[in-house]
Image (tube, grey):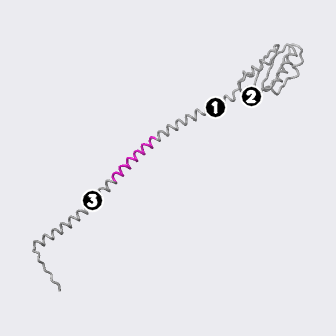
């Protein structure tokens, strides 16, 4: 058998109960306060993360806008370079295809003998037509010989009627000139 004796006076019982409830309240308050501190720390961390994310996204947007401006500027420069390269290529092509007729004139000046006068010189593409007057047939034959000896002239056509007259020979000669001879400035 068990006998329970309560020897504490009523006031002691109330004090013990109060101490028990105070301790329980203290521990519950401490746990609740710890949970609140933990949530505050988490909220602070989330706040800083969101703030940093906003700053980074604003900076990324600013960098993207800046790079778009730089990209447009770069595209503008590239377009200018393409245009300059196109014009340069066009000028180079023109220069490569340019025909220096002074080369032909210099060659003819060296080749044509003293007693021959050229009255007409016509060109079409690389075909040359010369008409003129020679004092005698030998001068004309000398001109024909010199023209045939020159490495730049080809495809000679001289009508036979050039040889009919002994003096004051009116002549016509058709021949071609090689393109490389008049497309560079050599002045041979």
x then y, percent, for residue 112:
80, 17
- Asked whether the residues under the numbered discs 3 and 2 touch, taking CB atoms below 8 Å apart as contact, a structural biologist would say no
Q: Which residue is mark 3?
A: 36
Residue occupying image coordinates x 30% and y 56%? 41
Label 3: few (<14), some or many (≥20) within 10 Å? Answer: few
Left or right: 62 in relation to 114: left
Query: Of marks 3 and 1, which one's residue comes earlier in the chain?
Result: 3
Give yes or no for residue 62 being in the magenta stretch: yes
User: Which type of secondary structure does the marked residue at label 2 adopt?
Assistant: helix
Task: Tell me where residue 79 sits by quadrant.
Answer: top right
**Image quadrant occupied by the C terminus:** top right
x then y, percent, for residue 65:
44, 42
Q: Which residue is mark 1?
A: 90
Query: Of marks 2 and 1, which one's residue comes earlier in the chain?
Result: 1
- Asked whether the residues under the numbered discs 3 and 1 touch, taking CB atoms below 8 Å apart as contact, a structural biologist would say no
User: In terms of depth relative to the viewer, which is nearer, 188 or 130?
Assistant: 188
Residue 115 sits above or below residue 100 on the image: above
Extreme-bottom residue of the structure: 1
Q: Which residues are magenta?
A: 46-66
Q: Which residue is mark 2?
A: 180
Residue 82 sits above or below residue 102 on the image: below
x then y, percent, for residue 174:
81, 24
Query: Of marks 3 and 2, which one's residue comes earlier in the chain?
Result: 3
């Amino acid at each position: 058998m068990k006998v329970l004796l309560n020897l504490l006076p009523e006031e002691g019982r109330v004090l013990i109960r109060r101490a028990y409830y105070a301790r329980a309240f203290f521990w519950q308050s401490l746990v609740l306060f710890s949970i609140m501190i933990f949530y505050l720390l988490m909220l602070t961390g989330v706040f800083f993360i969101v703030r940093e994310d906003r700053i980074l996204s604003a900076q990324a947007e600013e960098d993207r806008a800046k790079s778009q401006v730089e990209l447009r500027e770069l595209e503008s420069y590239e377009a200018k370079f393409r245009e300059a390269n196109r014009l340069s290529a066009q000028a180079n092509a023109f220069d490569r295809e340019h025909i220096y007729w002074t080369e032909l004139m210099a060659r003819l000046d060296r080749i044509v003998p003293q007693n021959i006068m050229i009255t007409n010189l016509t060109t079409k593409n690389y075909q040359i037509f010369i008409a003129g007057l020679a004092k005698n047939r030998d001068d004309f034959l000398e001109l024909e010989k010199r023209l045939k000896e020159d490495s730049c002239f080809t495809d000679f056509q001289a009508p036979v009627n050039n040889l009919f007259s002994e003096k004051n020979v009116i002549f016509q000669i058709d021949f071609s000139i090689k393109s490389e001879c008049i497309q560079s400035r050599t002045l041979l």
